[in-house]
Amino acid sequence: MKYAVLWLLMSIIMTTSVSAGVTLEGTRIIFDAERLSQSVLVVNTNDYDVVVQSWVDNGDLDNQPESAIAPVITKPALFTLKTGQSQVIQLVNVNQVPIQSEQLYWLNLYELPPVQAAGVDKIVLTMQTQYKLFYRYMAMTVPNEKLAQLLTLSEITQDGKYFLSIRNNSSVHINLAGIGIDGHSLDKFERVISPNGYQMISLESSIKNPKVTLDIIDDSGAVFTLSKSLSTL
């Protein structure tokens, strides 16, 4: 989930919160590419009413809703949510082209609170929250217990420097929450590995223990850990 804060009016005095007030049930969406539509529920947890704009795109925060390109559109795209109220958003499948692997898009929820008093200098703080939307055929789904079989881990040396290579041999994205090597955790790595893609992670030294642990976020948003031995190249 990603957030963007946008300032609309400059003022002298403000009282704001940077937490998203319009929230989705869950942290991600798995969209079945064979379905015509599916729904998600959003709730306004703010103590004030908001206007919400929703759309699906590739995740670029500079995108505008009218220029978004994605296989899924939202209905309604614009609505008002009173404080504490919920709203069902229909995600409608408009794709007509078969896909070979899972695709990653983002559901955007842009919330705009009302200006309470005209003529009063204030800051109006808007919030744009993004949720991952994984678009795939359900036949592509890989159970947690079988994922290790579809990953290839190896140590690579280039110009005297050491790297951990993680190759994703599946048709779905791998969402990493953590990587453990030789009893310590790595902190610099890409969080998502694309289908049939890989990433190279810089290491300070050669790996001593051939067992590497990966913390992976599954479809439900839960984290599970798997242990994988390095492959010999």
Image (tube, rainbow, N blue to C red):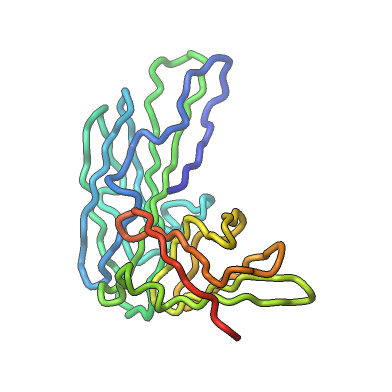
Q: Position of residue 223 (x, y in %)?
A: 38, 55
Q: Is residue 173 above or below residue 60?
A: below
Q: Position of residue 130 (x, y in %)?
A: 42, 49
Q: Is residue 91 above or below residue 126?
A: below
150 relative position to 90: left or right: right
Q: Residue at x 20, y 67 (%)?
A: 36
Q: Is residue 46 above or below residue 187?
A: above
Q: Quadrant of the C terminus?
A: bottom right
Q: Residue at x 35, y 60 (%)?
A: 218
Q: Position of residue 208 (x, y in %)?
A: 63, 69
Q: How many marks?
A: 0
Which residue, as the protein is rendered here, is positioned at the far bottom?
233
Q: Residue at x 54, y 76 (%)?
A: 230
Q: Residue at x 59, y 73 (%)?
A: 165
Q: Position of residue 20 (x, y in %)?
A: 40, 36
* Quarter of the figure with residue 231: bottom right
Question: 178 or 60: nearer the eye?
Answer: 178
* Quarter of the figure with residue 80: top left
